[in-house]
Image: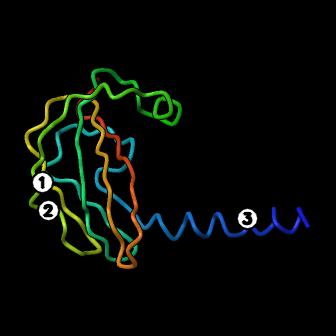
Amino acid sequence: MFKNFLLTILIILPMAANAHSPLSSSSPQDGETLDAPPLEIVMDFKSPAKLVKAELKKSKSNQGNGFLGGLFRGDDGEPIPIGESFLMSMNKRQIIPMPSLADGHYLLSWRAMGEDGHVIKGELNFIVGSI
């Protein structure tokens, strides 16, 4: 009985995680180092979604980049205003205009809602310049 339950969970969990993670690509990519600051962040979803929240922070250190840093990171970033004009539009491609960014480590935290009403969230780390 327990084996059947465990098998069911192991089969369903990856399918559920995949269904609620429709981000297929982004520019810049997560973890990418850029020579010049981006003028915009482009997020391509597998199906239409609308961004309901997006926050950009400049890290005070390189802490938070990579898997382990993300687990132990505190809320130590300097908020960068990015406006809200791009929010609440249902599209497969979301474009977030960027202000002028200085060299440093950045973290974009976002939350979106799919066509089916499910909330999707994620983070995108990128570096501007050679730190």
Q: Position of residue 44 (x, y in %)?
A: 32, 66
Residue under pointer 3: 9
User: Residue 2 in the image: x percent, y percent?
Assistant: 88, 62
Q: Which residue position is annotated with label 1?
A: 97
Q: Amino acid at mark 2?
A: Phe
Q: Residue at x 24, y 61 (%)?
A: 52
Kindly identify the residue that appears in the image at 74 percent across and 63 percent down: 10
Query: Compared to 17, does 104 lie above or below?
Result: above
Amino acid type, callout 1: Pro
Nearer-N-terminus badge (3/2): 3
| Residue 56 placement (x, y as % from top left) | 22, 41
Q: Residue at x 25, y 75 (%)?
A: 91
Can you tell which of label 1 and label 2 is closer to the viewer? Answer: 2
Q: Position of residue 106 (x, y in %)?
A: 27, 36
Q: Give the label on residue 45, or none.
A: none
How far apart marks 3 and 2 lie (CA) works out to: 37 Å
The amino acid sitting under disc 3 is Ile
Residue situated furthest front in the rendering: 1
